[in-house]
Image (tube, grey):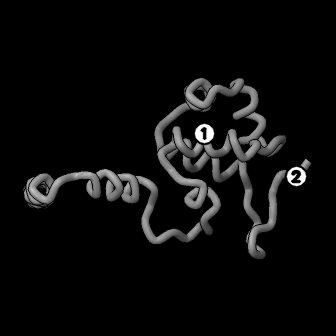
Amino acid sequence: MNMNIIQGGIELNYASRLKYFRNVAGISANALAKKVGLDPTTIYKIESNDSKPSLGSLERICDVLGITLADFFAEEKQELEPELRRLIETVKKLSPEQRDQLQKLLEVMSTDSKK
């Protein structure tokens, strides 16, 4: 059974999207299933394109993966990769002083990596 859906003329493959974001997050299918409260076989079925998640399950999966539903359904070409978006969201929570310190740290790290 083909679990791909057409979204705005673009084919969305739950299997490849889930695998991609799970790999970006560095989490195994078993660990994801445990954190989401699903049976591991459910994750494997989604990733083998034999099933698609309910909206509630997909919301919990996205939450564990640190992405939004919008990220999951976004077109393949995204302005920023998920890792960078998560970093930006974390930085937004910092005080101006903390952001300044982080900027200085990143500049030092950037300079050190060029040596």
Q: Quadrant of residue 13?
A: bottom right
Mark 1 lies on residue: 60
Q: Which residue is mark 2?
A: 2
Taking the image as shown, residue 112 lies to the left or right of residue 3, namely: left
Locate residue 3, reporting x and y percent: 83, 51
| Left or right of 48 on screen, residue 94 | left
Q: Secondary structure at mark 2?
A: loop
Instruction: Using the image as rendered, state which of residue 64 and residue 92 is in the foreground.
Output: 92
For the residue pair 107 and 7, the one nearer the viewer reads as: 7
**Residue shown at 37% from the left, 58% from the top:** 84
Tell me what residue is drawn at x 62 percent, y 45 percent: 59
Q: Position of residue 70 (x, y in %)?
A: 58, 60
Q: Secondary structure at mark 1?
A: helix
What amino acid is at disc 2? Asn
Q: Quadrant of residue 6?
A: bottom right
Identify the residue shown where x is 88% and y is 52%. 2
**Which tag, 1 or 2, sits closer to the chain's start?**
2
